[in-house]
Amino acid sequence: MLYSLIRPLLFRLDAEKAHNLTLSTLRFLNDYGLDTLLTKPIPDQPVEVMGLTFPNPVGLAAGLDKNGDYLDALAALGFGFVEIGTITPLPQPGNPKPRLFRYPDAEAVINRMGFNNDGVDTLVDNIKRSRFQGVLGINIGKNALTPMERAVDDYLTCLNKVYLYASYVTINISSPNTKNLRDLQSSAALSELLGRLKMRQLELAQQHGRYVPLVVKIAPDLEDEAIEDIAKVLMAKEIDGVIATNTTLSRDGVLHIPEAAQDGGLSGAPLKGRSSRVIRKLAEALDGAIPIIGAGGITRGGDAWEKLNAGASLVQLYSGLVFRGPELIEEAVNACRPYFIMHGSTPRRAKLDIQTSTLQPESPKDSAALEMEQVNPEQSPVAADTAAAPAPVSDTHGVIQLAPTPPDVPVVDTPVNAEGKELSITQLLAAAATPVMPPHPDGTPSQPAASAKPAAMPPPATAAAAAVAPAAAPAVPASAPAGAPADGGEVSPSQEVPNIIATSKATNAYLSSGPRKKRRPS
């Protein structure tokens, strides 16, 4: 491999200069079609997570490409997904240099970069120029000068601006290099932050007709009780995924290196055990309700398998690439294949209560029973009062654009047509939104009106008016205060905007119901 030849030269340079030179070289090779010098095509190992189809379970962690400058070049290396950022509302230089350090003997990296980036507007411009059509994660954070009490404003600003361009959005609350950022992991602060972001996510989903999952990235230095508290908040706020973990403040594994005592987050091989411990504890607390993306300490293919075995559905690399180069990507994908052969290509599914949008983990018995379930037409009426036909389903960076669905449409495990063939997702959503016409008086079946023909998807600017119809508010007793739920309990985000989240998670439930034909980027 070419990387093994140039690595000695890179390690003679300052770490940050080597970082920038490597990325510039990758972009040059990609621009001239020479990226095959660094890697070869990696056979797909499709995985269904968060309603998205990942070509393989190995992704790039945030931090390598903060501004999306090298998106096409990095995607060409064979990642199943790419996460860029961390991005902040305004440009900021980060912490003073030097701020990036490598320790080859320990396969470790220490960084105190401090969210150096060119601002969210630059990142969006770079994405628009990119040719990348795969699964794209965008990692968002707060500016260093923003007071903690206003941190949510920075996250909301970034979410608003990147929503249309992301397959999923990661909320970074765990970097050790932004003062007091990890305070947002406390139960009360996290609940308030995620409550605001979840409501904005649902508003944006209604506005644009596409549901973009929210993911939270947590630290590896959490005690068991804190992990359990975070899991409770994630489930209560119906967050779509969690990345475990960020870098650590611990120096275990590099205590014998005097220079490693400096400030910053430690990543690489010494982080592996600490990260896997958090994944195991988190998986136990979540019990399958929310998928985990495992990151931290993957320097060999077997390390990726370890993350999956601990409870992750996907994995991410970064520091391992510094020492192993692009060959680590293929090695990790190949190491993961036996896991998916044994356990299937989807994470443990979750049942959806359409009325409350509450996810309930399935037991193995429930899953087996659902496989045998048959659709009873008498118990599964499709709402007949749909006013307009849905927009067709399409993909943007792997995100499903959702047509409106009546809240009372039941979700079945494997919908089939009259010939017994499984319906495609397009057919499923079209059937769910097609009006059921009453028969004529003479008993002959009625035909849907011509106006029920699927309409073209409106451009993003008009999606608020045409793409998704707002849902009717649930009935509230006259004695209840304004905005209170019918049962007198706390208003959840899903009760505020039930239609879009129910439609999204109903779609996700279908997507995770078993192997299906993979969507390839156009």
Image: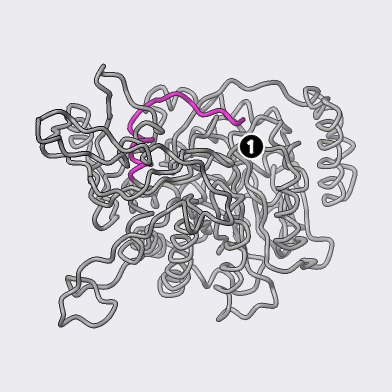
Front residue of 452 and 66: 452
Residue with the most extreme top position:
419
**518 within the magenta span:** yes
Amino acid on which disc 1 is placed: Gln
The x and y percentages for residue 413 are 26, 33
Tell whether 177 sits left or right of 495. Answer: right
Residue 283 visible in the snapshot: no
Q: Is residue 257 visible from the viewing direction of this image? A: yes
Judge whether residue 448 is colored magenta. Answer: no
**What x and y, as percent, mark residue 215?**
49, 54
Circle 1 residue: 133
Q: Is residue 368 above or below residue 63?
A: above
Q: Quadrant of the C terminus?
A: top right
Which of the pair 221/218 is nearer the observer?
A: 218
Spot the residue most to the front.
442
What secondary structure is the magenta-colored segment mainly? Answer: loop
Is residue 138 shown above or below 390? below
Residue at image location 79% in from the left, 60% down from the top: 99
In this view, the residue in front, 218 or 48, is 48
Which residue shows up at 72% across the image and 61% down it? 121
In the shown orientation, is residue 332 left or right of residue 100? left
Q: Secondary structure at mark 1?
A: loop
Q: Which residues are magenta?
A: 506-522
Task: Quarter of the image for the N terminus: give it.
Answer: top right
Q: Nearer the viewer, residue 244 or 241?
A: 241
Q: Which residue lies at the image location 78% right of the left edge and 53% below the top edge? A: 101
Q: Position of residue 495 (x, y in %)?
A: 30, 64
Q: Position of residue 72 (x, y in %)?
A: 73, 37
User: Image height check: is 147 above or below 279?
Assistant: below
Give the quadrant of residue 380: top left
